[in-house]
Image: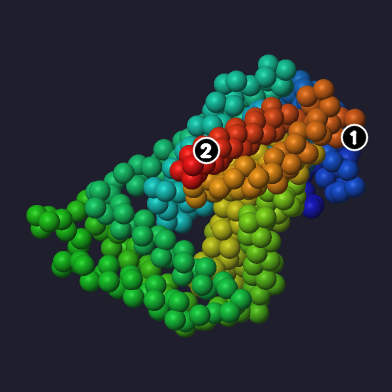
Amino acid sequence: METPAMPMPKDAREQAILDKLSAIRDQLLLLKRDRTKYIRTQDVIVHYDQVVEQVKELNEIRKGEKVTETRVDRVLESCLQLLSLFFMTIGRTQEAPAAYALTSTIKRLLDHLTEADLYSAKDLNSIAHTLSQLDKVMTASNPSHSPYIVELLANRLELCHSSLDKLKKRVDELQDPLQSMHERLISILRSMSLANTKAKFSASEVQRLQAQVKEIDESRVDGNFVGPDGQVLRGSERVARLVDVCLTWSDIVLERKGVIPEAFKSRHEQLVSIRNELEKLSITQAWSLRETDLYDYQRKLDKIDESRVDGNWLDDEGKPAELYVQRTLLYLIRRSYGYIYYLMISSEPVSEALLPIYNQLQTLKRCLIEVKDSGGVSSVRELYPYSMKLNSIDNMRVDGKFMVGGDIPEGQGSVSALLAECYDLSYELKVMAEELEEKEKASSS
């Protein structure tokens, strides 16, 4: 993915740094695309150290000077973004570098929520929880990491917290009875947008959603939402506006039936494709996702998002997109960023080299829990398949470690803890089965 056009550095020393960073970025991209082998920790750390060294030199050059963003900054951003995703891929999700890409995505989401002014408390709660986790990561940050990286992340987190606080205040302005209604309307509006972007448009689906909005609209008294005491609820005007937005949007969607004008069709198709691919990954991510894959999706989305002029896209003749096109494209972009955010926070603290074992144990754990919840087994023999699988995984260890190609991948503790959980569940089921067998023998004698 090309780095967006930026002015070249004027200082010859910065040009040298640009050349080195460009080479590092290219090496990272090659490493990302290589599917013939697992990504090893040592391969990531060597590139991380190289980038940190260039950052150190860049800071020395720019010390005390007014900084104008150049191509150096953009290529550096690409390197840091890639390294962040690599840290996730090797399972070092609880270290500062891994947080870089996630803060970028959170900032994008918060900017879009602020721009649209269409969000619920549920949206903010998830982001607030993630930011809280990132704060803990920063607090426990390894002192070996570059102070520049740590400071950069701290500033990014501060910006995210600031944006989040402003959005929370807007939600808190709504009186309690209206908050749930507001959340429901946001959900309906998004469902309409989803129906609008499906391969096969369903008018009945949109009409059903429209009917739900009309039902809410009819609960107004003289245009306002009132409490049991007849008093106008705080935030009534805002929720009333949202009702109008939903009704207007439903009428537009029913009229247009998912048809996008030719001038914006290619951009629409690209965004639908990105959204669909990310949706598939969100379902199969445990088995098919390499976190570094998200880099390409991020860059494509950023490029489309940043091509807007005053918040809207222009056609070849410089004319802005009509409301229907603008909202449809924005929905696809925001939905895609949402999937990227979900995939990042779902990243397990386990190297991709150990993920096949980790995923098998996750599946085995779920099966054992389901068996336990359904009343257990009638005899110990029924547990043999589970015991054999556990033993086969346990026997993969060499001196207590899971080895892959002579390496000891990150995430040993997480895999061992999960293996122990499975053994505990299997033992509990065995005890239950033995007790049941003893009762049956006692009753038959």
- Observer-nearest of 323 and 378: 378
Q: Distance from label 1 to label 2 (Cα)?
A: 47 Å
Amino acid tagged 2: Glu
Residue 12 place in picture, x, y as percent = 87, 31
Residue sitting at the far left: 229
From the viewer's perspective, tell me whether residue 130 is left or right of residue 173. right
From the viewer's perspective, tell me whether residue 301 is left or right of residue 395. left
- Observer-nearest of 404 and 143: 404
Q: Are marks 1 and 2 in contact (CB under 8 Å)?
A: no
Q: Which residue is mark 1?
A: 405
Mark 1 surroundings within 10 Å by alpha-carbon count, few (fewer than 14), some (14 through 19), many (20 or more): few
Q: Secondary structure at mark 2?
A: helix
Q: Is residue 74 visible?
A: no
Q: Which mark is residue 315?
A: none
* Identity of the residue drawn at 55% across and 35% down: 431
From the viewer's perspective, tell me whether residue 427 is left or right of residue 387. left
* Identity of the residue drawn at 68% across and 51% down: 285
Residue sitting at the far top: 143
Amino acid tagged 1: Gly
Q: Which mark is residue 438?
A: 2
